[in-house]
Amino acid sequence: RGQDINQAIWSLAVAYHNNYQRELSDSLFLLLADVPEYAPQAFVGLAGNESCFPPSNYETIVELYSKALSLGAELDLVEWCRYAYALTRIGRRTDAESVMSQLSGYEDAAIYEYYWKTYRDDGLYEKALYECARTYQLSDSTVNSQLNQSLFKAETEYFGQEAEISEMKAKHIKTVWGLTIFLSFVALGLFVSELRRRNIRNQLRLEEADMIVNESFRLNKMLQQGNEELQCEIDSVRSKTYSLQRMLLGQYRSGFAEIAALVETPNADKIDNVAAKRYLSKVKELISEIESDGAGWSKFEARLNESFDGVIRKLRIDYPSLSEKRIKLFSFITIGFDATTCAVLLNEKQEYVRVMKSRLHQFLESNPTENTALYRMCLNEYK
């Protein structure tokens, strides 16, 4: 019973196609596209609808015929010709010629119609008329023959008009070319005349330009000499500044040398000298700043920034991801503390402090900034 229904759908789809009701025909073919027995011919029917009812989408036609062939559909001569023509329209001329070569032994109106349309699309109107005449001569009915004869007459008039238009275009192009050449010679004469006048003016300008260039070279040479002298002065100032910075750093470190020895707080009660006790009290206050993490450390860091070109502030700006422990280590190294003192203050082993210092040095060298020379100087002479 299901087979009878599918056959009825197929027959109705073909009938709609023959009566130029494409939408109804397409909807029925689509119903059969999911039925294995009817799917190949259903895709053929969809491709036929797309071919017969303009505007045709030739890529869709090729896709539908290819799908039908992959499902084992058997195309008749007309369908092969439609397939080949669609291949031609999407630029697959080689594939189309391969299909038509398989039909070379046949003589049918569909084959001549293929060549007629192809020649027409290529602008070969004489060949198109010849194939058009052969098409209607092989028509299999009087009505088709009469229709094709009318079509041949229309095509003949159309192609004749195209030939006349092409001839008129050719004459027009010749006329335009003639006028263009004439005007070109006139323009060329004017151009040569103007060019001569400009050559005279340009010669004067070139002489003036040579004078300007020579003067520019002279001024540039003077400027280069001035730049060299200025650079020498800048280098001298930088050298003096660097020497002063190193001297300041040495003095600063010498001031903290005694503090480093007092990191382990001595017993002040055993010191009899009042001045020594007072000095020890100040040193202990400074050590408490160094050992603290809050306001005390901020106070010590402010001391260091004020005394040595804002080095810690610059370090925090250049490397915001740097940990507090690394910043403290940098501060201790700057004031001249050795590995033993740093280890006590950071509560780390001496060997680990040396590793931290090495890694800090590598980090700063691999991420240079405009303050790298300052950081490098603060980290040198570390033991």
Image (tube, rainbow, N blue to C red):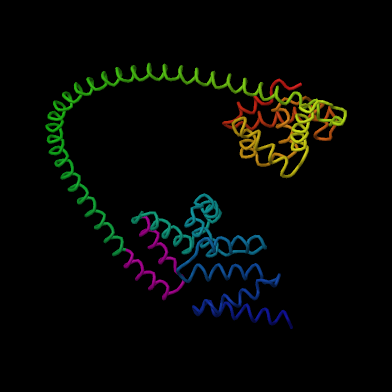
Q: Position of residue 161 (x, y in %)?
A: 26, 61
State whether the magenta stretch is mostly helix, strand or loop.
helix
Instruction: Say which quadrant the N terminus sits in.
Output: bottom right
> Residue sitting at 74 percent across and 44 percent down?
294
Q: How many marks?
A: 0
Residue at (40% x, 57% y) in the render:
121
Position of residue 21 measured from the top left corner of the image (x, y, whole percent): 51, 79
Image quadrant in which the C terminus is located = top right
Q: Position of residue 51 (x, y in %)?
A: 50, 67
| Image quadrant assignment for residue 353 | top right
Residue nearer the viewer, 56 or 335: 335
Q: Is 214 inside the magenta-drawn segment?
A: no
Above or below, 93 relative to 377: below
Q: Which residues are magenta?
A: 127-155
Q: Is residue 179 above or below residue 231?
A: below
Residue 53 vertical position relative to residue 115 in the rendered view, above or below: below
On the picture, is 52 further left or further right than 318?
Answer: left
Q: Looking at the image, which is closer to me, 124 or 35?
A: 35
Question: Residue shown at 30%/63% (left/top)?
Answer: 158
Residue 146 placement: quadrant: bottom left
The answer to whether residue 341 is left or right of residue 376 is right
Image position of 259 (left or right of 82): right
From the viewer's side, name the closer residue of 105 and 89.
89
Relative side of 275 to 374, left or right: right
Q: Is residue 137 magenta?
A: yes
